[in-house]
Amino acid sequence: MKRIAVLTSGGDSPGMNACIRAVVRTAIYYGVEVFGIRKGYNGLIKGDLIKMESSSVSNTIQKGGTILKSARSQDFMTSEGRQQAFEHLKKHDIEGLVAIGGNGTFTGATLFHEEFGIPIVGAPGTIDNDLYGTDYTIGYDTAVNTALDAIDKIRDTADSHERVFFVEVMGRDSGYIAMPCAIGGGAEIVLIPETKTTIPDVISTLQNGWSRSKTSFIIVVAEGDEEGNATEIAARVKEAIPQMDARVTILGHVQRGGSPTAADRLLASQIGIACVEGLLNGKKDVMAGFVNNRLVYTPFKDTITKKKIINQRFVRMVEILSV
Ligand code: F6P
């Protein structure tokens, strides 16, 4: 393999730049030319490719976002779009691709590989940590720390005003961000899609707390919880307890930005190297990840369809520690 390309796609996550850097420098280390594709699959469809040198990724390891920019491409979900994308790869003599992203990125990647046979190795880049085939995704640790920092600040004001705060965190259909935020942020209760915590459960937690002279509460809500979002849940609890002084904070996209933590930089760098070495060793249609500290390549199909299970021990921890 003499020439490869790298792109970032889907929601950005802190550490994507560290991963791009590792891909570019590993390729150069092995004497392989590397191109950056801008704006994800949309850039590939349009032929927005740039040759990357070692200096192209200088001073980027500590930066949030993605220097290649990102997009959720609808066009790549069409066969015409993928055909155009392939033409651009052919035109540039690109023989392998590194795709950094999440579920949607890998769904597109596996289709693309199936149709055109182009070897693709994926790097798990999403704050959601919802990908099967890796214990942690690039950006997850930073997002959790960002959310936790915000929750600590909310706790100060919750305590001063003796209020109940419903704090909504991201995570799409998973509670991976919510769970460590609840444990690390000392929340009284957490609502995640993977468990059935009902409005009556929230009400009884609050009432028990008040009866034990607790004066303020943090309730962490994963955005994908089945009971609704934090605003809806707070409104339903308020109906039952009109005297409750409650506020809702939606942390939102703040969780996607910022300088990556040491853990994310290390993970992103290891995975970037593994992606290029994987391509050079004949891997295709797989994601590079770390499970129990061991590098594994998991077929894209499994990363998309198999469910990563949240450890039930964590669910119990919140209950025990909020007594
Ligand atoms: O997948 C990352 C993520 O931040 C999810 O947690 C969230 O549901 C979604 O992306 C938000 O997407 P967008 O940035 O397109 O609004």
Image (cartoon, rainbow, N blue to C red):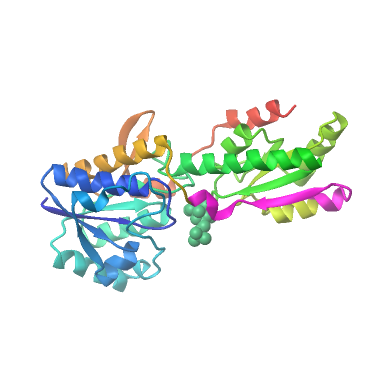
Using residue 207 as the reference point, say whether residue 97 is left or right of it: left
Q: Is residue 14 above or below residue 76?
A: above
Q: Residue at x 25, y 40 (%)?
A: 273
Q: Is residue 246 above or below residue 135?
A: below
User: Among all residues in the image, which is located at the extreme bottom?
Assistant: 80
Q: Residue at x 38, y 52 (%)?
A: 101
* Residue 197, image x, y percentages: 70, 42
Q: Quadrant of residue 35?
A: bottom left
**Quadrant assignment for the C terminus:** top right
Report if residue 201 is visible in the image.
no
* Residue 317, image x, y percentages: 64, 28
Using residue 260 as the reference point, say whether residue 282 is left or right of it: left
Q: Residue at x 30, y 37 (%)?
A: 270
Residue interval drawn in magenta: 237-256
* Front residue of 308 and 161: 161
Using residue 2 as the reference point, say whether residue 97 is left or right of it: right
Asked if the magenta segment contains residue 249, the reply would be yes
Using residue 196 as the reference point, say whether residue 161 is left or right of it: right
* Front residue of 70 and 237: 70
Q: Residue at x 50, y 44 (%)?
A: 143
* Residue 306, image x, y percentages: 44, 44
Asked if the magenta segment contains residue 107, the reply would be no
* Residue 257, image x, y percentages: 47, 51
